[in-house]
Image (cartoon, grey):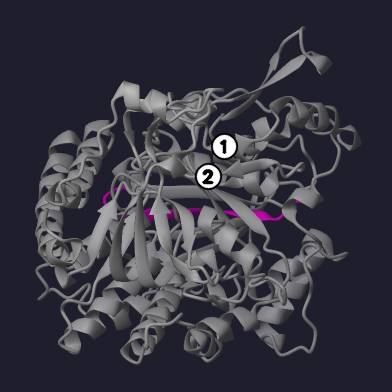
Amino acid sequence: MASKSAVLPLLRRELRSSSTRISRASASLSTVAGPTSSLSASGRRTARHTALFSRTKALGQTRAFSQSLSRKLTDENGHFDPRQVERESDEVDVCIVGGGPAGLAAAIRLKQLANEAGNEEFRVILLEKAGELGAHIVSGNVLEPTALNELLPDWLSEDNPSRFEHATPAGEDKMRFLTQNSSIPIPAPPQMNNHGNYIISLNELTKWLGERAEELGVEVYPGFAASEVVYNKEGSVLGVATNDLGLGRDGKPKDTYERGMEFHARVTLLAEGCHGSLSKQVIKKYDLRRDSEPQTYGLGIKEIWEIPPEKFKSGEIVHSMGYPLPKDTYGGAWMYHFGDNMVSIGLVVGLDYPNPWLSPYQEFQKLKHHPLFKDVLEGGKCISYGARALNEGGFQSIPKCAFPGGALIGDTAGFLNVPKIKGTHTAMKSGMLAAESTFAALQGDSGGTVFLFDYEDALRKSSIWKELHEVRNMRPSFSTALGLYGGIIYSGLEAYLFRGKMPWTFKHHGTDAEATKPASQYEKIEYPKPDGKISFDILTSVSRTGTNHEEDQPVHLQVKDWDKHKDIAWPQYKGVENRFCPAGVYEYVEDASKEHGVRFQINAQNCIHCKTCDIKVPTQDINWQTPQGGEGPKYFMT
């Protein structure tokens, strides 16, 4: 049998060419199958697994597990320990976890630097849990193009045959304060000025960035879910491992069982987005929040509508606050006209809301019946739905971003500018800064643990730090005694006069989970039934996400003791999980045999990976972990 050292160089070249062929084939398959087809993601995932694990065959090994071998791997009590099975591993220069704007910007910048230095063998691998790039991406999105202009200056150039073709120049800006039936014009802070910006689908931009990354030589692997951080003996990060495939719901291996794979990297960049499952582990292990406030979050819910041409106003941007949210709940809405008769409409609800009867999903349905939005949507058709948690902590909540062997980038670190309602430009810029620091560090690397101290320094000197520091008190002011109206006034003063120069910095008042109060302190909210034209029931909306999970696998929404959870959560919060989840994952089902007369149920197949449950549940005993690679939503135009 050939030695591993002799085989690996050949395999790497084959893997790169296989990756390119698979990407092209996948693109063709996606075009034929359409955005909602599960075949596209499944076929792509299988092909990429085949290419990546081709090394096993070259080494004369087998990964197939027979049923008899599966039984041998279980103990006398029927328990299975996957650690009995050795993982395959691959060595790369940089491993990036997450194929969003931060991860792709980092990957592109790394390969730009490597290629400029004549080091085309510099390996950058990007792992994305979605079945295809962009499939898990949800954003408003009015793009501030500063970082993209720097990274790929010709991204909109007419002379570029690979230009991005889905950008609508921002037009008229409107800001409104809503009451139940009226819309009051109010001045928008200067940070929200969108002159020179573009309305886009971040889902589409991410796909486009992925194509540019692969052209430069980045190895992009959708359908590979990094589920575990791998550490060196001394405690630094060695890389990541993908999750095992072919485990049954009981945790035992099926005959299709396949052990995950380890990627060992000189530097690992975590670009998982808001509240990443690996990032949580790393932040805790290295105590990266020791000098920062706890992170706070919002839940963004979005739909894409196709509207009648006579109602379409290309480039128009509308933001609102007030109705339908109560005064003790931070949030706001948007409506953007883009593309060909398309409208992006959405609502962000701060997850520090106290009333457990409130449902962000139902508040969004109410919003659409306000005349400001209903007049535009009537006669149109909803074609897409999505939801995702986002960081709202701002400057105060930025953790230490470098750790032994890697760094946090993008929304994983929390670089969203809340008053500006933008984070793509800061996410991309952070990825580029991390890439430059990483490449420089690896040029003088002696083989030990890499510490990206220069990345931390670069962040503090960057435009990211400056703009987040300037607006640091605006979002937290709404959670002080000032309340809604006082927060509006104070934020106006900050925006126009103080510009972040005041000597104080407001603190956050605990976590979003801690903000949730007992249901007994509030009246139950009775939401109107959906009309099926403007507003929809939750399962209809979930069907528009294309989400899919194999049912016979371990539940990725981990609750150690379901009965204990129910016995604590139900008496106090009366099913808050059912209301904060925008996908109908959690239910309390009547069951006379159970204490309190209800049974806690998790419909994991509905999950759209928003992470809200992990953030908001008052008992903090729901742990969101990544399911099998390639599963989850298949977002379109979000």
Where 638 falls versus 97 (above or below)?
above
Where 200 falls versus 382 (above or below)?
below
Q: Nearer the viewer, residue 420 or 45?
A: 45
**Residue under the point 79% across and 75% down:** 506
Residue 533 in view = no
Q: Main secondary structure of the magenta part?
A: strand
Residue 409, x across and y down, in percent:
47, 71
Where 341 falls versus 38 (above or below)?
below
**Residue under the point 17% across and 68% down:** 163
Reading the image, the residue beneath label 1 is 557
Q: Residue furthest top?
A: 592
Stretch in magenta: 329-341
**Residue under the point 65% across and 63% down:** 284
Determine the secondary structure under disc 1.
strand
Q: Residue furthest right?
A: 521
Determine the secondary structure under disc 2.
loop
Residue 452, x across and y down, in percent:
48, 83
Q: Nearer the viewer, residue 601 or 497?
A: 601
Circles 2, 1 touching at the beta carbon (< 8 Å): yes
Residue 167 located left or right of residue 234: left
Which numbered tag is attached to residue 625? 2
